[in-house]
Image (tube, rainbow, N blue to C red):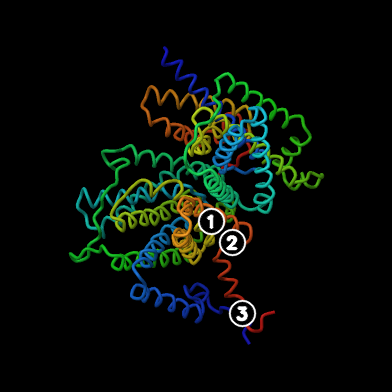
Amino acid sequence: MDVFWQLTTTGLANGMIYALVAIGFVIIYKASDVINFAQGPLLLAGAYLGYTFLSLELHPALALALTLVSCALIGVFIALVVIRPLIGEPVISMIMATVALSSLLHAIVQGVWGARPRSFPLSTEFTHLVAVVSVTFLLVGWFFRRSREGLAMRAVADDQQAAMSVGVSLPRTLAIAWALASATAGLAGALLASMVGVSQDVAVVGLRVFPVVILGGLDSMVGAMIGGAVIGLLEAYTGGYVGSGLQRVVPFVVLLAILMVRPYGLFGKKRMERV
Amino acid sequence: MRSGVFYTTYAADMALARSPLARARLVLFASCVLVLPFVVSSYWLSLANQIAIATVGAIGLNILVGYTGQISLGQGAFMAVGAYASGLATIAWGLSFWISIPLASLFTAAVGVFFGLPSLRLKGLYLAIATLAAQQIVEWIVTHWTALTGGTEALVVPAPTLFGARINTDFGFYWVAVGAASATALFTANLFRSRTGRAFLAIRDQDVAASATGVNVFRYKLTAFAVSSFFVGMAGALIAHYRTIVTWERFTLEVSILYLAMIIIGGLGSIVGSFLGAAVMTLLPALIATFGRSLQTSNPRVAELLPAAQEAVFGLVVLLVLIFEPKGLGKLWSNVKIYFRLWPFSY
C-alpha cells in the first residue's frame, strides 16, 4: 500500500506539472490554432531564469515575478516577430516555425548558461504545487471566460477575419496569448526544476505533454487539468508496477488510440474535421 | 522573339526535360556529378555521400508531405526501420547488400502503411501528432528490444560488396549513393506524370474535391505512405551500410525535424528542392564546424559553443525561409530561370 501511495503522489505531482504545461498549449491553440512545439525550450528558459534570479539572492516571490515577466516578454517577441508574418500560412509552415523556434531558443539557452546541470536553490512541496497549479488554472479560466482580452482571443481562434472586422487587433491578441502561455511555461519550468534540478531534461517534458493535451482536448482547460493528472498517474503506475522504461511509451500508445477513437479528446469541442 | 515556353503537343508538355535548355542543364549537372569524385578530397566526398543519401530521404518525405499533403514527424522512425531491417538481414541471413536494401525498403513501406492508417481519419495538425507518436513508439521499440536490435548498443553492419570486392571507401560508395539518388529522382519525376501521382496532388490540393472526382482517397493516401516510406527506408538502409554501424541516436525526432526542414527550405513538392534542401542542411553544419575549428586556436570557448551555434543557425535558417520565401529554394531557382528566359528583354 505504501508503494501505491508513493506512486500516486509522484504521479499526481508530475501530472500537475503536465497540466500546467498543457494549459500553455491550450492558450496558444485557443488563440491562434497553432500547436506550440517550442514549449520545451520555454520551460528550460523558465528553469534557468528562475535559477539565475534566485542565485542573485532576491526574495523568492520577487525572483518568481521576474522569471514570469521575462518569459512573458520572450512570448511577446515570438508572437510579433515570428508568428505574425505567418498568419494564414498552411499548418506545416506553422509547425515548422515553432519547431525552428524551439531549436533557436534551445541554442540560446545553451549558449548563455552552458549544458552543465545545476541544482535549483529552492525545493517545492506537493501542496505548493497543487496550490500554484490551481490558482493558475482559475486565473486563466477566468481570463478566457470573463475578460475582454480573453473573449477577443476566443473570437480570433474561431474566425480570424470576422474577429478583425469587428475591431479585434490580431497582433495584440497574439502577443497577449503568447505572453500568457510563455509565462505559464516558465512557471512550469521553474517548478519542475525545483523538483528535478536545472538540466536539459526539463525541456523533454515539452514533448511528453502531447498525450495530455490530446486526451483532454486541445481547446479545453478542464481537459488539460484532468488529462495531466491521468497521464501523470498512468506513467507512475506503469513505471512502478509493469516495468520501468515502459512509462515513456505507454502515453503515446494511449495518444494514438484516442486519436483514432475520439480525436477532439475528452473535453474538446467537436470541431475537428474528419477525412 | 519568344516570350515564353509554349508546348504544341501533349508529349512535349509531359516530357521530363521540357526545353533544350533544361536538357542542357541536366547534362551539365550529370557531368559535374560524374567528375566530382575524381577532383575533390575525401572529406568533401564524404559530404557528397551524405548529401546523396539525404536526397533519397528528402525526396521520400517530400512525396508524402510536399506532394500528398500528409504531414509526417515519423521520418526518423522509418529510417530506423530501414536501417535495422537491412542491417539485420545482412547479419542474420547473410544476404547481399543488393538484396537486403530493396527488402528493407519494402519492409519499411509496410510499416509506413501501418502508421499511415491514422491518416485515413486525421489530417493536418492531428496527423502530425499521430506520426509523432509513431516516432516515439518505434524509437522505444528499437532501444528496448535488445535481443533483436542490440538496444542502445551499436549494431555492426558489413560494408556492401560487388563481385567479391568490398565497397568500403567514400569513392566506392559514392557511386552507390548517387545511383540510388538518381533512381529515386527519376522514379519520382515519373510518378507525378502518372495517374497515381496526379491523384496524390489532387488529395493535397483538396481532398473532398479529389474524392468527388473519383479518386479513392483512402487507397491513394496509403499508397503515398507506402511509396514515401519505401524511399525513406532506403535512405536509412544506405546510411547503415555507409557507416557500417547502426545506432538509435541517428534516428531520433531531431532527424525527423531535420528532414522536414530540408524539404521546407528546398521547397515542398519539388525534386530539385529536395536536393537543394538536403545539400544546404548537410553543408551548413559542416561549414560551421570548419569555421569553428579555425577560430578555436584563438579562443578555446568556441568548441563549447559549437553545438549551440549549429542549432541556432538551423532554427534561424528555417525561420527566415518560412518568413521570406515560404516556397523555398526551389522557388528561387525557378525565379532565376524565369528571369533569364526573357533576358535581356524582361519587363
Give the mark, 2 or 3, whose residue is nearer the N terminus: 3
Q: Residue at x 35, y 48 (%)?
A: B81
Query: Distance between the Cα atoms at labels 2 and 3?
Result: 22 Å
Q: Amino acid at mark 3?
A: Gly
In front: label 1 or label 3: 1
Nearer the observer, A41 or A178:
A41
Q: Can residue B304 be seen by looking at this rendering?
A: yes
- Residue bearing mark 1: B313
Give the side of residue B173 with respect to residue B22, left or right.
left
Instruction: State which mark lies toward you, 2 or 3.
Output: 2
Q: Position of residue B246 (x, y in %)?
A: 31, 50
Q: Residues within 10 Å of mark 2 (few under 14, many from 20)?
A: many
The mark found on residue B333 in the picture is none
Q: Quadrant of the C terminus of chain A?
A: top right
Q: Chain of mark 3?
A: B
Q: Residue furthest top?
A: A1
Q: Which residue is mark 3?
A: B4
Looking at the rendered structure, the kind of residue marked 1 is Val
Q: Amino acid at mark 2?
A: Lys
Q: Chain of mark 2?
A: B
Disc 2 versus disc 1: distance between alpha carbons?
19 Å
The residue that mark 2 highlights is B327
